[in-house]
Structures are given as C-alpha cells and as structure tokens.
Amino acid sequence: MSKDEDVIESSNGKDAVTSEGNSDMEPYVGMEFESEEAAKVFYDAYATHLGFIMRVDAFRRSMRDGKVVWRRLVCNKEGFRKTRPKRSENRKPRAITREGCKAMIVVKKEKSGKWIVTRFVKEHNHPLVVTPANGRRTVLLSQTPDEKDVKIRELTAELQRERKRSAAYQEQLDMVLREMEEHSNHLSRNIDGIVQSVKEIESKRVAPSNS
C-alpha cells in the first residue's frame, strides 16, 4: 500500500484510519484508528475542513497501567465560560468564545489496540467558518486569554497528576529494590552458614584420620 493512501485494512475487516487521515471523510460510530494520535489528527483535519477548531478534552486512564484508554475531542466552543468577578469597571469585556457547542467524537481503546469511535455528535450550534490551510496557525494563535488560561490550568493539573504518579511508582520501585537487597543479604548469610558448616564437618572428618 502506498504512503498516500488514507486507510488500511484492519484485522477484523473494518477500515482503520491512519495518521494521514481524510478530511473529507465524516466520523461515524465504529470507525477505527491505529492510535489515539491518529484519531486526533483525523478529527483535527475534519474540523479544519468543516470550519471549526478541535480541542482535546477529557480523558480516562486504565486502572491497571495508568495509560489513556478513552478520549473526548470537542469543538473549541464546547461548554461555557466561567463567570468571574469583575476586577475593574473600565476593563473591556472579553469576547464570548464558549457557546455550549456539543459537537464531538469519543474514542476508546479496544483490547486489540485499535481506537474506536463510540460517540459522534455532528451538529454545531454556531456558524462554521472554513479557514484556508495557511490561515490555520493564525486562528490557533488568536485564541482568547480565557482559552489559554484554561489550557494552562489543564496542562498544569495533568503535570501534577503525572508527578504524583511518578513519585508513587518510584516509591514502589525503591521498596522492591530494598526487599531484593534484604533477600540477597539473607541469602548470602545462609550460604556463608552452609559453607562454614561444611568446613566444620570436613575438619571433623579429617581429625580422626590424623590421630
């Protein structure tokens, strides 16, 4: 299969979308991807083609190994901006960027390793504006301070969670290493005791023969 092709045949006969994606293809429940990143790339391309901006939203981790196994990708106008107390009467109000849009896809990792679309909401509650490919960067850079603040808080919270998880793993590793060291020391003492016993037995056997 050539590099430019958009889909490959999965093991169960369904189409699994590769990371190249196809912006003309509409998501559907049951659609498969080779990875979470492939799903993100596809939905981002679809969003650009349709005229909205994708935002990586909520996720869930496996209780077994802590890896992400569920992800929601939404329109950047999803939800509503939280109301904050006014700091100054002269301060210019920020533009409303959250409009409660419910457009999204939800992807879930299967036992096979594939990521499958389990939910797709197509309808947006706001006008869609198709952006030229070379204007995509401008749109992303023009996000409001509110959106940037939210993203920073999300990333900071995720970083803190990862640090706590890493510290817990390190503590478990240190405990295992200590137990291994104690076991090794105990084994060494047992071996030394056995060697000493063998020497004593040998010395007792040699003593009568010399008498």
Image: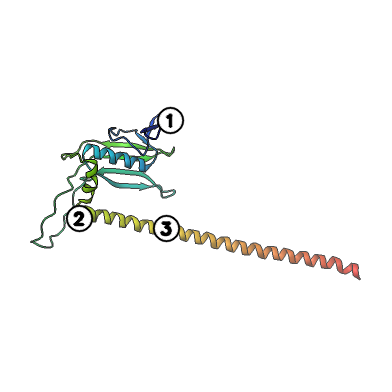
Compared with 79, 175 (above or below) is below
Q: Which amino acid does label 2 sit on?
A: Pro
Q: Which of 148 and 65 is in front in this view?
A: 148
> Which residue does the numbered mark 1 point to in the structure image?
12
- Image quarter of the N terminus: top left
Find residue 13 and report its image quarter.
top left
The amino acid pointed to by label 1 is Asn
> Where is mark 3, residue-wise?
166
| Dot label at residue 145 | 2
At which x and y percent is residue 143? 20, 51
Q: Residue 26 lies in what quarter of the image?
A: top left
Q: In this view, does 92 lie above or below 57?
A: below
Is 47 situated left or right of 192 in this image? left
Q: Which residue is drawn at 50% across and 59% down?
A: 173
Q: How far apart are marks 2 and 3 (CA)?
A: 31 Å
| Left or right of 206 in this view: 150 | left
Q: Is mark 3 on a helix, strand or loop?
A: helix
User: Vertically, is 208 above or below 162?
Assistant: below
Tag 3 or tag 1, which sits nearer the N-term?
A: 1
Q: Which residue lies furthest to the front in this view?
A: 134
Q: Distance between the residues labelled 2 and 1?
A: 45 Å
